[in-house]
Amino acid sequence: MSSEKATAKPTSEYAVACRDLRHAFGGAVAVDGVDLAVAEGEIFGLLGPNGAGKTTTIRLITTLLPARPGMVEVFGLDAARHQMAVRRSIGYLPQQLSADAALTGRENVELFARLFDVPRSERRERVGEVLSAVGLENAAERRAQTYSGGMIRRLELAQALVSTPRLLILDEPTIGLDPVARDGVWERIQEVRRTTGMTVLVTTHHMDEADLHCNRIALMHRGRIRALGTPSELKSGLESGATLEEVFRAYTGDQLDEPADGFRDARRTRRTASRLG
Amino acid sequence: MAALCVVELQKIRHDRTELYTRAIQPALWLLIFGETFSRIQAIPTGQVPYLDYLAPGILAQSALFIAIFYGIQIIWERDAGVLVTPTPRTALVTGKAFAAGVRALAQAVAILVLSILLGVTLTLNPLRWLGVVVIVMLGTAFFACLSMTIAGLAMSRDRLMGIGQAITMPLFFGSNALYPVALMPDWLRVVSHVNPLSYEVDALRHLLIGIPGNLPLDFAVLVLATAAGIITASSVLGRLVR
Ligand SMILES: Nc1ncnc2c1ncn2[C@@H]1O[C@H](COP(=O)(O)OP(=O)(O)O)[C@@H](O)[C@H]1O
Ligand SMILES: [Mg+2]
């Protein structure tokens, strides 16, 4: 490292670097010493069952929860010191519903364009671009309350994309969707990445998705990273034809579906559905 | 900041039913309470008919009701992407506060139209109308900040609803919205003096009906209260996400 003291200078070439990341809610430790490095341009999957600590990790990276200095760097900028710069570089799709059902698709995306200071002269065009990038150009004038689950997730993807972020952070982008809608969402994610070269950090509890779509995967369980590598690396230690599901079991000794905190998590993950009402 | 007010206008344009259903309560106050108390002349308001005296109070009340439940939105949006935008928290809070004001203004139109139909004489001076807009915006913004602060402390929708229900009526009755301060027992007079709603009503009465009031004082109180509200609400906003 150089000895420059200019604090705004990036100190690493990683899109995201976490060192000994920790967070506890009261006495409950949600993230327990996570080390991660996401390279620029890759699709990095954070895979783990409900309650593993994925969302908490994401919230620390996005500055929603306060990280201590030295814990999180986004494009080399410390998230504790350069909150605004970090937020500016991130497009974030929360696990919970973030689209406003009372507004049309276009109005929802426009709001984010304004909050990210997309210049007025480019706003219209930019909003139109991202709406078609997620395949909603024909539904843009309808209110979001008429959308299907998959359309809402794609709308939220458009909201996250409208600021042309360098890093796209997706927290369970396919949660609660049927297989067809899940494919629809992934298709759009892949296409956006192909055309922009954006870095994507995505969480999921679907093994098959991580296997199929991610360049590298970190297996997370009970606040810790248990294994890290490309899907084939992770599978290589086991018999040929092993699924990631089996990999997970091998690394943690646990069933994937084991509920860590059943009722609470069910309420949190389903709030998405009830808010649409 | 303006972005959130734009959103509020868009919502009002899409769905007017809330506007109408929310107009029912103030309409009842004017029609039943107002008409009855004008008839029995129980409340001395000098030369001014009681209904004229009451209309600005009901206008302020309806704005209060809109504002006090506005914090619920913030609870819903606690994890929504807006907090990960480079827009500072104070700007978000200010935007929300004045967005509540936009909604209150839409409501005010309905109440004032009804007042005119009931024979209330309102000012024709456009400058005074401009003043009404400013006062309603400030008053609503303050109570919306109060609501967001409670949201930040209560952390849950149900608790906010409960606290909201519990404080709206005391705020309303502990103000000059229904009766002159002169009629109040001493302890209530004290409450009314620290209640920003009283200053809002005083200003609206002066502007709409022409009843003498202390406009500079009202304005100063509302501006200071709103500024303090914005600062307080922004500082507790971060708690919501945790
Ligand atoms: N706001 C919160 N308050 C208290 N506990 C929380 C909160 N958010 C998450 N937790 C707990 O932290 C653990 C990790 O949660 P989370 O990060 O949401 O996991 P995941 O996203 O992997 O499902 C869980 O046990 C959860 O119950
Ligand atoms: Mg989660």
Image: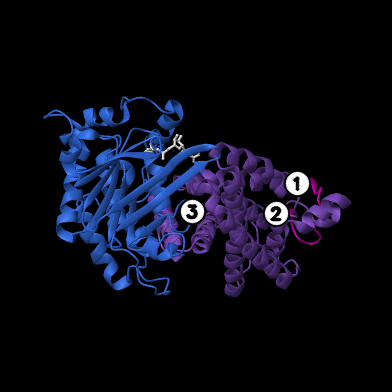
**Residue A243 image position (x, y, % from top left):** 18, 30
Instruction: Look at label 3 and name its amino acid.
Output: Pro
The chain that appears blue in the image is A
Which is in the foreground here, disc 2 or disc 1? 2
B43 with respect to A144 (left or right): right
- Chain B: what color? purple
Disc 2 secondary structure class: helix
The structure residue drawn at horizontal position 19% and vertical position 43%, both measured from the top left corner, is A230
Is there CB contact under 8 Å for labels 2 and 1?
Answer: yes
Q: Relative to A2, say whether B156 is above or below.
A: above
Answer whether residue B46 is magenta in the image: yes
- Say which amino acid is labelled 2: Leu
Mark 1: which amino acid? Phe
Q: Quadrant of ligand 1?
A: top left
Give the colour scheme shown: by chain
Q: Earlier in the sequence, mark 2 or mark 1?
A: 1
> Which chain letter matches label 2?
B
| Mark linked to residue B54 | 2
Task: Name which quarter of the figure residue A164 lies in.
Answer: bottom left
Question: Which residue position is annotated with label 3?
Answer: A66
Query: For residue B37, which numbered disc appears in the image?
Result: 1
The x, y position of residue B209, in whole percent, is 68, 64
Taking the spot 58% from the left edge, 59% from the top edge, the residue there is B141
Disc 1 sits on a residue from what chain? B
The CA distance from mark 3 to mark 1 is 56 Å
Q: Is residue A256 left or right of residue B108?
A: left
**Mark 2 residue crowding within 10 angstroms, few (<14) / some (14–19) / many (20+):** many
Mark closer to the observer (2, 3): 3
Front one among B66 and A2: A2
